[in-house]
Amino acid sequence: MVLPALIAGSIQTKTSETYIIHMDHASKPDHFPDHDSWHQHTVTSVSTACHEDKEPFLYSYTHVMHGFSAKLTSCQLTELEKSPAHVATYKESFGKLFTTHTPEFLKLKRNSGIWRTASYGKDVIIGVIDTGVWPESESFSDKGMSEVPSRWKGKCENGTAFSPSLCNKKLIGARSFSKGLQAAGINISTVYDFDSARDFMGHGTHTSSTAAGNYVFGASHFGYAKGVARGIAPSAHVAMYKVLWSSDTFASAATDILAGMDQAISDGVDIMSLSLGLGQTPYYDDVIAIASLSATEKGIVVVCAAGNDGPSSSTIYNGAPWIMTVGAGTIDRSYLATLELGNGMTFEGTSYYPSSVSITDTLLYFGRDDPKISECVTLNPSEVKEKVVVCESSKMIDLYGQMEAVTNAGAYGAIFLTESLFLDPEDYSIPAILLDTRYGNQIMEYAWRNTSTVKSMKFVSTKTGTGPAPEVAYFSSRGPDPVSPHILKPDILAPGVNVLAAVRPDVPFMTAGGYDLLTDYALFSGTSMAAPHVAGVAALVKAVHRDWSPAAIRSAIMTTATKGDNVHGTIHDQWKGVGATPLSFGAGHINPNGAMDPGLIYDLDTQDYIQFLCDLGYNETQMSAVIRRSRWGCWIDRKDLNYPSFIANFNQTTSMSEKQFNRTVTNVGAPGATYWASLEVPSGMIVSLEPKTITFTSKNQKQKFVLSVQLEKNAPKVNYGYLKWVDDHNHTVSSPIVVTSN
Ligand SMILES: *[C@@H]1O[C@H](CO)[C@@H](O)[C@H](O)[C@H]1NC(C)=O
Ligand SMILES: *[C@@H]1O[C@H](CO)[C@@H](O)[C@H](O)[C@H]1NC(C)=O
Ligand SMILES: *[C@@H]1O[C@H](CO)[C@@H](O)[C@H](O)[C@H]1NC(C)=O
Ligand SMILES: *[C@@H]1O[C@H](CO)[C@@H](O)[C@H](O)[C@H]1NC(C)=O
Ligand SMILES: *[C@@H]1O[C@H](CO)[C@@H](O)[C@H](O)[C@H]1NC(C)=O
Ligand SMILES: *[C@@H]1O[C@H](CO)[C@@H](O)[C@H](O)[C@H]1NC(C)=O
Ligand SMILES: *[C@@H]1O[C@H](CO)[C@@H](O)[C@H](O)[C@H]1NC(C)=O
């Protein structure tokens, strides 16, 4: 399923509201033993000053920022903001969720490549911020797992239907955070949800098993995609931080997300994976960005889903340059059904109908004279009952609507002639097949005869190696990044369409043929599914290179990404099937084995990010909100962020049509190495580079280069090429160069 954008519903407005208050930790008076008691006292004293009761204090934050969240009246807030220790105020906001065979598609092989070198992610801890976890799922069995690392400070909380004994050497932490939601007057559903880290919708179970699930043999989605299910880092440990709840709608409060991230940092995770987002706001207003920078400073790799708002451009979420922002791609697996008509013609199409039943000798129905009927907008139940209905591709109604219409009219089955293959697995409520419109005439010609029949329709067949794959998923959010268009986002593409992983097994996944169906494993789609693949790869790279910074790990993943698909040679867009650009696939498709040995890296540290914020022109208030400090230094001259990709935005009406990028690469390969530049540049773009050869005499040595890009008149609006540094030891360090113009 493609998970919809889920936002909190009705929020009670009382005279007091929830705020996150960011404080300067250096201002804590010495007589308070810790920050928590200082925060609590601060709220008590402003309440006294306003002659009001102390309102609920929600959380004290120590890692993501120094501060707290509480319900405050406007008087209390005004008093608080007068304090010299006050840094920033954020009003409560609500997040949305971005909602196998993949290891083979990613060329991960037992006993070779990065799996072997990284010991499958042994001793690395992945923290997942999500909807909870189903601990009994076989994916969280700790068979073959190493001991819990001694540095781990997390725990498994007791709660509704969750006891600490459910954790083990695989699932080493499980906590939940809902104070913020409850303070907003949103009740957690006692019917669908659990007041604990137990997953209510399967999303967190799916993402965490994708990142680090153990081996499960014979997993499948009702027979489709059958095989071994396991995470990308099958020996890594998992900790779940539940911040998303089922209420009258699905909801997630910023205060709770922040509390989960704060706890994950404190517990000692190495990688953090978030498949949700708050908004597209400047970093000083985006608490996920602020918390992620804090995590990054502590060496934690933060991986986030880019959002499901594609194919429109400028729809990226979580695009801060210290975050690894992940788009979704398709995989080379198709789900097929075969159709044989009464006249002997046979066709192969797409279907996820969850049963191996086959239809035989059934009447066909096609209402050819009225578009409303031929396109299945309205159907007469007495005419279609017990027949297989042919539906023409429609502009009036989409596939979901057609499926609903044929189901409601009581048809036995359906044949959809369509150019889009965007029907989610759980929408196959009756036996149905999707066929390309190019077969339309043949089928309609036969179907409109009164005696036409379906000889047979057979389901549940999975084919791998189908193409083109990967393609950028139609829903994957696209760049340019709305907050910082001069940083290329997304960073990377990873599998996010029909990903098989563990789900909640005790509630119906779908209704088909009138039956509610349960499953342990299911196919989900979304950038939500892509992010944990990258979290898993980051865990593998971390296992091989313990001392690498989050930026180095990201650089390794980006510069080794693949740019081709299995058909055209370049990655295409599922939407319209045309060639895609780095604005939708970033540096390319993730390539785990390559990421282990990138040759060179583009590294970044906290001071680089501080300089990046200085160059955005942030004032003191905004700076201290993002970097959580009261003192910092900025260079007066702008400095380029040492990012592993390049993007220039030109305005053709102005004369400035050259952009220079300064970069520094660090040699992480053998001590003596020489790299030659190979530039792949399309017409319309002029790129110069200085120097064109870089020589290293030692490991970890750094070298600088300058790349300049010019645009020719009448160049396409989006133009891109690549800079590749190549040595004679099989390293290709590749970065996209993108030029947009308006
Ligand atoms: C664990 O939580 C459950 C449900 O809230 C409760 O009934 C039980 O008493 C708790 N156990 C402990 C040891 O706190
Ligand atoms: C939440 O639950 C409380 C107590 O059961 C009830 O009074 C309140 O109306 C509920 N709020 C909503 C928004 O349903
Ligand atoms: C199908 O049957 C209808 C009425 O039963 C008739 O009007 C129509 O001409 C027939 N079509 C063909 C192609 O035989
Ligand atoms: C920074 O800008 C914000 C928004 O314009 C403003 O509220 C704040 O007072 C400014 N801070 C300083 C120190 O100028
Ligand atoms: C890039 O480096 C050159 C010197 O190599 C320097 O003059 C220039 O200011 C730098 N530009 C930026 C944006 O850092
Ligand atoms: C391009 O530059 C011109 C002249 O400075 C300006 O008027 C125009 O708004 C700019 N266009 C965009 C899209 O930035
Ligand atoms: C480079 O890769 C090829 C194919 O993977 C391999 O045969 C060759 O030995 C490698 N060369 C070096 C220098 O590692």
Image (cartoon, rainbow, N blue to C red):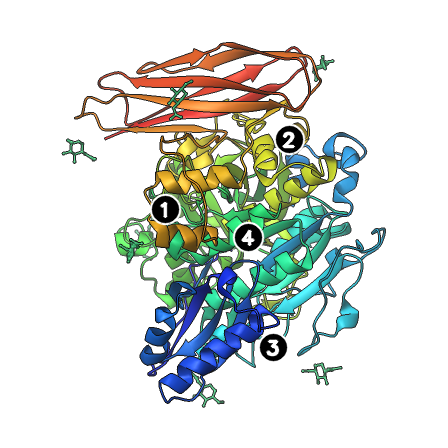
Does the Cβ of the disc 3 residue fall within 8 Å of ligand 1? yes
Name the kind of residue labelled 1 in the image. Answer: Thr
Q: Residue tagged by mark 2?
A: 595
Q: Residue tagged by mark 4?
A: 361
Element at badge 4? strand
Most foreground residue, 315 or 484: 484
Disc nearer the start of the sequence (1/3): 3
Q: Is residue 588 left or right of residue 393?
A: right
Task: Tell me how far mark 2 sits from mark 3, CA to CA.
Answer: 40 Å
Q: Is residue 674 left or right of residue 658?
A: right
Q: Residue tagged by mark 1?
A: 315
Q: Is residue 477 left or right of residue 168?
A: left
Question: How many other residues sit within 10 Å of disc 1, few (<14), some (14-19) or many (≥20)?
Answer: some
* Residue 543 picture location, percent across and down: 73, 40
Question: How many other residues sit within 10 Å of disc 3, few (<14), some (14-19) or many (≥20)?
Answer: some
Task: Tell me how far mark 4 sits from mark 2, CA to CA.
Answer: 53 Å
Q: Residue tagged by mark 3?
A: 195
Q: Residue at x 46, y 34 (%)?
A: 586
Disc nearer the start of the sequence (2/1): 1
* Residue 145 picture location, percent across and down: 83, 52
Q: Is residue 466 visible?
A: no
Element at badge 3? loop
Identify whether 405 is placed above or below 557. below
Q: Residue at x 36, y 21 (%)?
A: 660
